[in-house]
Image (cartoon, helix red, strand yellow):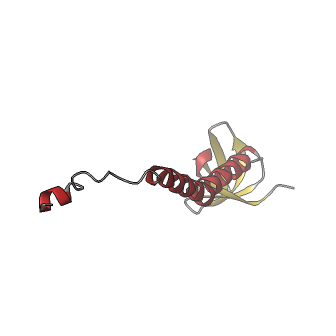
Amino acid sequence: MTDLAYAMGGMGGGGGAGGGDLSFIVMMAVLFAIFYFLLIRPQQKKQKEVKQMLANLGHGDLVLTTGGIQGKITAITDTAITLEIADKVKVKVSREFIAGVLQKAV
């Protein structure tokens, strides 16, 4: 057999093993399952929690923005929230930039 014929898989003597395709499919399924449970599912769970937190915001809640500003909610619309960050100092922030609730209003 020449080097070229050997590099191309040989002459005659059958191609690849028949079970190789099945093991590849099983391996890909296992890798997808690992990615799903380690990356995709926790991310979806976190997005659901953030969405629920944003839906439950109310007047008087003390919140933290993604920029690090803490303020008390004085007004809420569908897209924006007005925060009082000091006496007579109000800032309008988009809802998506609320990182968390520090204290719920009583």
Is 20 on the left-hand or right-hand side of 26? Answer: left
Q: Position of residue 26 (x, y in %)?
A: 54, 53
Is 19 on the left-hand or right-hand side of 46? Answer: left
Classify residue 75 by image quadrant. Answer: top right
Which residue is at a point 72% across and 50% down the rendered structure image? Answer: 53
Q: Position of residue 41 (x, y in %)?
A: 64, 53
Quick one: 106 or 48, which is closer to the camera? 48
Identify whether 77 is placed above or below 52.
above
Q: Position of residue 2 (x, y in %)?
A: 12, 60
* Count of numbered badges drawn on the protein: 0
Classify residue 103 by image quadrant. Answer: bottom right
Seen from this angle, which residue lies furthest right? Answer: 106
Q: Quadrant of the N terminus?
A: bottom left
Quick one: 79 or 86, which is closer to the camera? 79
Seen from this angle, which residue lies furthest top? Answer: 78
Quick one: 54 or 60, which is closer to the camera? 54
Which residue is at a point 45% across and 50% down the rendered structure image? Answer: 21
Is 36 on the left-hand or right-hand side of 8? Answer: right
Q: Quadrant of the C terminus?
A: bottom right
Q: Position of residue 95 (x, y in %)?
A: 62, 45
Would you say residue 30 is visible in this rendering? yes
Would you say residue 94 is visible in this rendering? no
